[in-house]
Amino acid sequence: MLSTLPPIEESQLPTVPQQSERNTPTPSDTPISLPLAIKGTKDTSTPISVVAAIPTVISTPPHTMTPTESPTPTDTLTPTATPTPTITPAPKITCIQFPEGEFAGLWSAYKNRLGCPIQTLPVPNTDTLFVEQPFSFGHLFYFESKDIEFIIAKYGQGDSGPWRLFDDFDNFPDSYSCPEPQDIQPKIVNGFKHIWCVYPEIRDLLGWPLDIERDLDIELTQGFDNGFIVRDSDGFTNGMVYLFFYDDTYERVPLGPRIFLTEVDDNEEDDDDDDDGDNDDDDGDNDNDDNDNDDDNL
């Protein structure tokens, strides 16, 4: 059963204070100076705790080097000494006969290239027909004897060069065209004209003629196994000769002094030795006679 509360008297209620009127200050035009810093003010702000993120370290497995194969060593060749080249001496020329006359001395210097003489003496032009014609860059020579006939085309103005031999005149064409101008002087005639007109390569190498063909009766020729020697009119004047070798090359060289080559007989050498021995014996006899005379005087 609830108890009955006693009644509250009015005097026992708390008094509520009355709000008094407050005078709001009137704004002033005078500026207020504020301090730039407040000394002794304690910072009551709560610090913010920062948690740094720790990076996660991922371990990478170490790189394994793949071994490379070592190259197989190659055998080093031991250098061998280079053998000293030996000079093979030129074969000795053994001839039945030796050349005589104007070209004998020249043959002794070129005998390994010329070979043995077919003719012992040079053949003068009085016994043969020898015709020559000079050109801008060479010569044409015509030689004819009782059993030989040929034309030599020599190219170049130097002391050596090529040459060509023409000895088959039966195959020369009877008719041919030639670029020779009508007013050219001197003229090219006969066999020389055939060569110069029919063979354009020869014409280009020789050039234009400088003189007519001439037969001066002062030329000499001599044949050998591997070539021949020719003295033309210019060589007669200047002491020069041509050596034409059958390898299609020539040389123009001084003729040199005239010498005579003879084959020495071994028997003659033995006879000379015997004669020297006899002379020595005679000298010995004379010495003995002198000694006898000295004894008589004593």
Image (tube, rainbow, N blue to C red):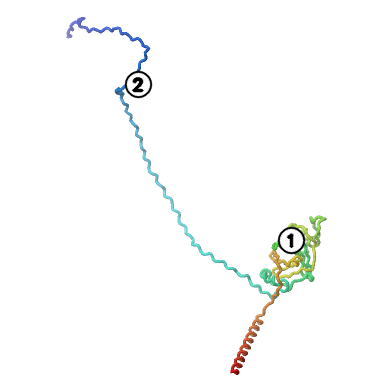
Quick check: can you spot residue 167? no
Q: Position of residue 150 (x, y in %)?
A: 76, 66
Q: Which amino acid does label 1 sit on?
A: Gly
The single residue placed furthest to the right in the displayed view is: 183
Earlier in the chain: of badge 1 and badge 2, it is 2
- The disc placed on residue 56 is none
Q: Are marks 1 and 2 in contact (CB under 8 Å)?
A: no
Q: Where is residue 28 in the image (x, y as percent from the top left)?
A: 36, 11
Q: Which of 105 and 154 is in front in this view?
A: 105
Image quarter in which the N terminus is found = top left
Compared with residue 105, is residue 69 higher up or lower down, i.e. above or below? Answer: above
Image quarter in which the C terminus is found = bottom right
Locate residue 83 relative to residue 229 in the image: left or right: left
The mark closer to the camera, 1 or 2, is 2
Q: What residue type is labelled 2?
A: Leu
The single residue placed furthest to the top in the displayed view is: 10
Secondary structure at badge 1 equals: strand
Q: Where is residue 36 in the image (x, y as percent from the top left)?
A: 35, 21
Q: Quadrant of residue 155?
A: bottom right
Locate residue 69 relative to residue 192 in the image: left or right: left
Q: Residues within 10 Å of mark 1 (few under 14, many from 20)?
A: many
Q: Name the residue under label 2.
A: 36
Q: Residue at 55% across / 66% down in the picture?
A: 84
Secondary structure at badge 2 equals: loop
Q: Where is residue 211 in the image (x, y as percent from the top left)?
A: 79, 61
Rounded to the nearest whole Å, what is the CA distance between mark 1 and mark 2? 124 Å
Q: In which quarter of the image is residue 254?
A: bottom right
Q: Mark 1 points at which residue?
A: 138
Quick check: can you spot residue 208? yes
Q: Residue at 52% across / 64% down in the picture?
A: 81
Compared with residue 109, is residue 77 higher up or lower down, i.e. above or below? Answer: above
